Amino acid sequence: YNYDSKYFGSVSYRRDASSRFKKEHQWGNFWSIGGAWLISKEDFFNAPWVNTLKLKGSVGSQGNDKIGDYLYADSYNVVNNDNQVAYQWRQKGADDITWETNTNWNFGLEFDIFKGRLSGSLDYFYRKTSDMLFSLNTPPSIGYTSYFVNLGDMSNAGVELTLNSQLINKDKFKWD
């Protein structure tokens, strides 16, 4: 959404399904919301050396299903055991595994100053991964060596600064 070329907003929602999870856990709900305010277009803003100043923010989630197929089900190999049919573990299923979810928060400023000579952005981000998909090792003596679980959360955060400068701007030579 764009109102008066000063206020911007967006909202999204999606519902994804993956056959990599058991039927009861195959659906994931993912969303996002974001907005921006072009402060430099406001009547009260009076800084002639600032061409553009934008405040922005967003939060949203995405899903991850990047594991092998049918890991929710037990599976076996049929083997010959002294001329008799026998079953051997191939994979231990984990019927409660579900989507790994990444939620991202971003807040920042974008700017363009001194008639385009200097521009850039300053952003803060925070990312939290929940229900991480993890292959848990087991002792081979139980018949299989691992199975998948949703285990733990992880987060990271940081600040990112991007600067662009137009050092020389002549008719036949430009240096950014």
Image (cartoon, helix red, strand yellow):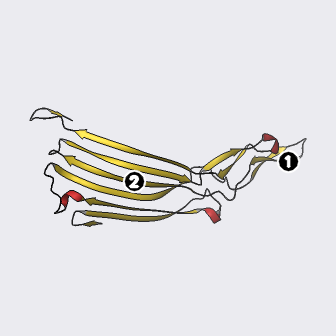
Q: Residue at x 65, y 61 (%)?
A: 22
Numbered badge on residue 56: none
Q: Quadrant of the C terminus?
A: top left
Q: Which mark is residue 86?
A: 1
Left or right: residue 129 versus residue 162 is: right
Name the spot of residue 92 as percent of width and height, x first: 74, 50
Q: Earlier in the sequence, mark 2 or mark 1?
A: 1
Between the residue at mark 2 and the residue at mark 1, the CA separation in whole angstroms equals 55 Å
Q: Residue 60: horizontal and vertical position, in percent?
A: 44, 59
Inspect the image, locate mark 2, and give the three-letter code of the amino acid beneath it. Answer: Asn
Image point (18%, 58%), residue name: 45
Image quadrant occupied by the N terminus: bottom left
Element under disc 1: strand
User: Which sits in the foreground, 48 or 142?
Assistant: 48
Disc ID at residue 106? 2
Q: Is residue 173 above or below residue 79?
A: above
